[in-house]
Amino acid sequence: MNIADARRQVAEINSLRSQSRYLHAIEITTPALFERLEKVAETSSSDNQTLPVKKCLLLKIHCRELDIEELLYLVLEVELPVSYPSAYACKINALSNGAPNNVVSAKLEAYLKQFNGCECLELILDWLSENRSTCLSNGKNNSSNDKEGMECYILRYNHLLSGPEHKKEKAMVDAAKKSKLQGGLLWGTPGIVVVVPPSTEEDAKEYASDSRDIGKRPDGVERMHLPQSGLEEAGLGGLAQQKRGGKLQNLDTAMLRLACGGDEDLLRSVLGVK
């Protein structure tokens, strides 16, 4: 473990536990390891040293201590990988009444993927508060208003390839950031850009024009409604969007499925698959 990562892990946990509203909610389940990291963080003068460790720091978040009535029986087991937060986000195992809740685990891990390099524990706590009424749902029983969804704009490309060697795609990402376009990008064949509010249809059309100038031609701009709860679970709205600014969220198919509220027909429509 890098000393800099150890110091950041200790500082993050101590900062949260110093607040009375989180003190009893966060339980460190590897106390000996935490004490060792605390001591190293206090005594080491260099961030470049490494510390040999055999296991990861583990903790639990007890939602009953957060005064979230809807989640009284939810506990999150959180693992901080040895290279967290510089290279990896937290790993989450959610338990409802002591039994695994794969729905919550998948939603949170999909949400956290975008925050590699960032301290994530407070983001988890904020996400729980924001999604208290929907996070236990599998996405198939949304209200009629949620099913109507938010108006988004879909741009499909023959292919979008990830990596700095693909200069046209890099230019597309830079153009989106410059225009503060809100949404997500699915790499692959086809490549998909999902433009979400507050970005508008005009913003999406302007981005399509920018893409054509770069040499990546979308097949048009299609208006489509996606469920608000799904967008937020996939990190395409709300708090995640605010923290990301104008940077497009990297998506995989699982995250795009979340954005579609688990609706396979809607997912196929977004992908342009008949």
Image: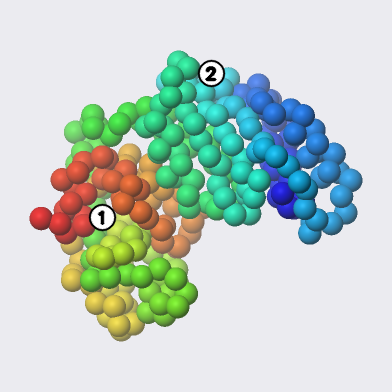
Occupied quadrant, residue 78: top right
Looking at the image, which is closer to me, 216 or 69?
216
Q: Quadrant of the C terminus?
A: bottom left
Please provide percent x and percent y for residue 228.
Answer: 30, 42
Give me the residue at 51% from left, 35% from top.
Answer: 92
Give me the residue at 45% from left, 62% from top.
Answer: 247
Residue kind at label 2, given as amino acid type = Arg
Residue furthest out toward the front: 54
User: What is the count of numbered marks?
Assistant: 2
| Left or right, residue 40 beside residue 131 | right
| Left or right, residue 184 beside residue 11 | left
Occupied quadrant, residue 77: top right
Task: Judge whether residue 199 can be spotted in this image.
Answer: no
Considering the numbered disc 2 on the image, is that residue within a helix, a strand or a loop? helix
Please provide percent x and percent y for residue 261.
Answer: 27, 40
| Left or right, residue 83 beside residue 116 | right
Give me the residue at 26% from left, 65% from top.
Answer: 189
Give me the residue at 49% from left, 56% from top.
Answer: 244
The residue carrying mark 2 is 64
Please provide percent x and percent y for residue 51.
Answer: 78, 48
Considering the numbered disc 1 on the image, is that residue within a helix, a strand or a loop? strand
Residue kind at label 1, given as amino acid type = Cys
Please provide percent x and percent y for residue 148.
Answer: 19, 41
Looking at the image, which is closer to me, 3 or 9?
3
Q: Disc 2, disc 1: CB below 8 Å?
A: no
Residue furthest out toward the left: 274
Question: Of the residues under marks 2 and 1, which one precedes in the sequence?
Answer: 2
Task: Judge whether residue 189 can be spotted in this image.
Answer: yes
Numbered badge on residue 98? none
The residue carrying mark 1 is 152
